[in-house]
Image: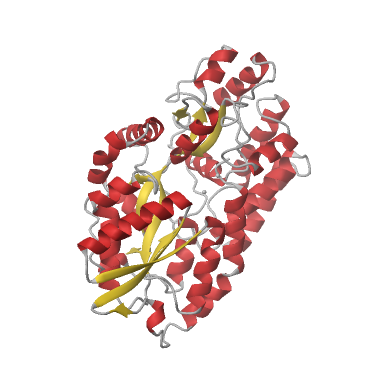
Amino acid sequence: MSKSMSRRVRRAGSAAVVTLAVIGLAACSATGDTGDKSTGGSDGDKVTIKFSWWGSDSRVTSTQQIIAAFEKEHPNIKVEPVNTSWDEYFEKMNVMAAGNDLPDVMTQDDRYLTEYATRGLLADLGSLDVDTSKIDPAVVDTGKIDGKLYGIASGVNVHAVVADPDAFKAAGVALPDDKTWTWEDYSKTAAEITKKSGGKVYGVQNYSFIEPVLEVYARQHGQEMFTADGKLGISEDLIASWFQRSVDQIKSKAEPSASTATEVQAAGVDGSLPATNKGAMAWFWSNQLAAIEKDAGHSLVLLRAPGDHEFSNTGEYLRAAMSYSVSAKSKHPKEAAELVDFMLNSQEAGDINLTDRGLPSNLDVRQAILPKLSAADNTSAEFIESLTADKMFDVQKPVPPKGSGEVSDITGRINSDVIFGKKSPEDAAKAWIDEVDKAIGQ
């Protein structure tokens, strides 16, 4: 979800963590009798499978259309929908796991994929009949843990700077060359916009609430937030420098005061500075551009992360918007795999989904839907394509370890202490490392 990580995302992460013990209970009972309800029963000669997802009313409608199309193509399979809001999704999944009632096919988020996989709750999709030949191998790898495929990305997005050309023009400041700009350019440009607009528009929205920006920053410096073996891989000094830049930008008025920044963060995407025409730049996931443009009332652009050519490494990474997984205890793994394959590879499903579940991971489906996209979604798609062409995603980040769902909340709380002056960037970095280490069990 995210600024690009809204209150709902942080609250959902906390709820999921609280109930992780429930998942452990489910794993311990894996040898027990699951009964019909764990995978659905049957309807005459039909096999019934459950499919769970989170999302808005519009996603419910589109998913029902996809299910109808799938059932028409597979008359022997009935799909029982299990949908809820993002706020409640993982809490509900954990309760279902405890009752040996996990859906046959479920939508997963990368923060929880390891948690479910290491407790034996997910099947290895590599052993099932799901075609991944049209998906970039780097994208397939986003769902692999210890060589096994536990989730396949429905689509992808990338974290980027959303910029308002109108705000730049009104302030008399040129849009930066995002193929060459540095972090220093980013801060100076933001401060210049605030100054030249007379404070009516801020140069940038506070970034240090958002853990994906820290991930980008770390990767640029040759580090990873989490290593392939599930350990913290970012240095204390680097985290401190990341927080320090935020403090400096508040002082220079490149970004709002701590109180305003907190209010804006709490307001989510709709209340962000670019969406309310009060800021020239902010960090978001690329697939959020359309929603921000709708609120802003005019076109916006996406800029690459500053610093990608300042350092020896690119920080950009493709993130699975969400992934499809199959329950390890499904009584109908063949039919579950058929649904996953349809969601990923059917052009009919792609035409219904468009970019609602990210820019389609199936490259053929992706190309076919491009003419059908809105202007904003086309901008997002072209942005990802340009980064791909420039080989910005050659090295993907490892799948986060169990407990990583807490990092968003940890980052937000500690950042509040920093921008309100309760903690120095150095002390904040120490606290961040201590809390994240505890969350991931180090």
For the rendered model, the colour scheme is: secondary structure
Count of numbered badges drawn on the protein: 0
Residue 315 appearing in the image: no
Furthest residue in direction right, as rendered: 422
Residue at the bottom extreme of this rendering: 33
Quarter of the rendering occupied by the C terminus: bottom right
Q: Quadrant of residue 267?
A: top right
Please state which of residues 311 and 17 is positioned toward the viewer in this rendering: 17
What residue lies at 25% left-to-right and 39% top-to-bottom? Answer: 367
- Above or below residue 338? Residue 237 is above
Up the image or down, 195 lies above or below 103; here it is above
Q: Is 415 positioned to the left or the right of 79 in the image? A: right
Q: Residue furthest top?
A: 172
Query: Which of the pair 320/187 is nearer the observer?
Result: 320
- In this picture, residue 77 sits left or right of residue 110: left
Residue 177, can we see it? yes
- Where does residue 188 sit, x and y in percent of width and height? 60, 21
Say left or right for 5 vs 376. right
Identify the residue shown where x is 74% and y is 41%: 424
* 84, 98: nearer the viewer: 84
Image coordinates for residue 289, horizontal then vertical, percent: 46, 35
In percent of width and height, residue 117 lies at: 43, 68
Residue at image point 32% right, 60% down:
67
For residue 13, above or below residue 380: below
Is residue 138 depicted above or below 230 in this figure?
Answer: above
Q: Who is closer to the viewer here, 402 or 91? A: 91
Q: Position of residue 20 (x, y in %)?
A: 56, 70
